[in-house]
Amino acid sequence: MQIDTGTGRARLATPSDAAELVRLRALMFDSVGVDTSGPHWRQACLAHLRENLGGPRLLGAVIDAPDGSGLAAGGLADILIRPPGPSLPDGRSGYLGSISTDPRFQRRGYGRAVVTLLLAELQRAGVHRVELHATNAGEPLYRSLGFTERSGGLEMRLVLGRAGI
């Protein structure tokens, strides 16, 4: 499946897109002030994408840069399998992440095309609930696609090893 923006075509990512997806992921982290200087996460991410991208649990969507310089935009979708519950009877959910457009190619609808393709593929895979963490810049796009703030509990995080556990 592909989504045409008029200026670029979103396509499913392949393991050969992994290095560029890591670059775009770093741009996304940089945009929210996360330090991306360490090389170890990049190497681990590259290996993870090469091994899992296009498999049963990790989807990617990308748009090739119009000038041939790599990728203009990309994003990832994890298919998560959890124990079934009242709001998730089959236990399948999706998580969108690493949605990023190279600053040289922003404001062309590329982010929307990437997210739209990922949502279509998640739906095709039988996923009915999708979550994400939005940046301030991405929030209007996600709201326009129907995403709303999560209810039903406070989202919290624990980094093991830092909490004395």
Image: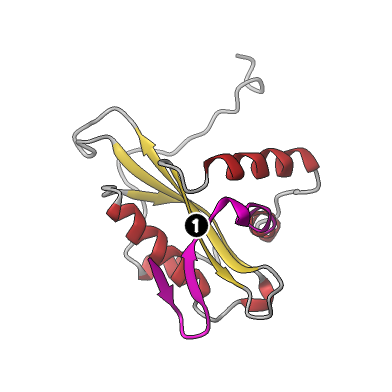
Q: Is 1 positioned to the left or the right of 44 in the image? A: left
Label 1's element?
loop
Magenta span has 61?
no
As drawn, the residue found furthest toward the top would be 165
Three-letter code for the amino acid on which mark 1 is drawn? Ala
Front residue of this view, candidates 29 and 90:
90
Q: Name the residue under label 1.
A: 134
Residue drawn at (18%, 34%), measured in percent from left and top?
Answer: 86
Residue at x-position 67% and y-position 61%: 31
**Residue 107: % across, % down:** 56, 80
In the rendering, at what x and y percent does residue 63 appear?
55, 70
Q: Is residue 81 left or right of residue 114?
A: left
Residue at the image position 67 percent from the left and 58 percent from the top:
20
- At a point 68% along the width and 80% down the height, the residue shown is 67
Residue 51 in which image quadrant: top right
Q: In this view, does 158 lie above or below 111?
A: above
On the question of residue 148 being in view, the answer is: no
In the figure, is residue 150 to the left or right of 77?
left
Task: Residue 150 in the image: state x and y as whole percent.
Answer: 35, 49
Where, quadrant-wise, is the N terminus in this rendering? Answer: bottom left
The quadrant the C terminus occupies is top right
Q: Where is residue 68 in the image (x, y as percent from the top left)?
A: 68, 75
Magenta stretch: give its range.
Answer: 1-23
In front here: 113 or 46?
Answer: 46
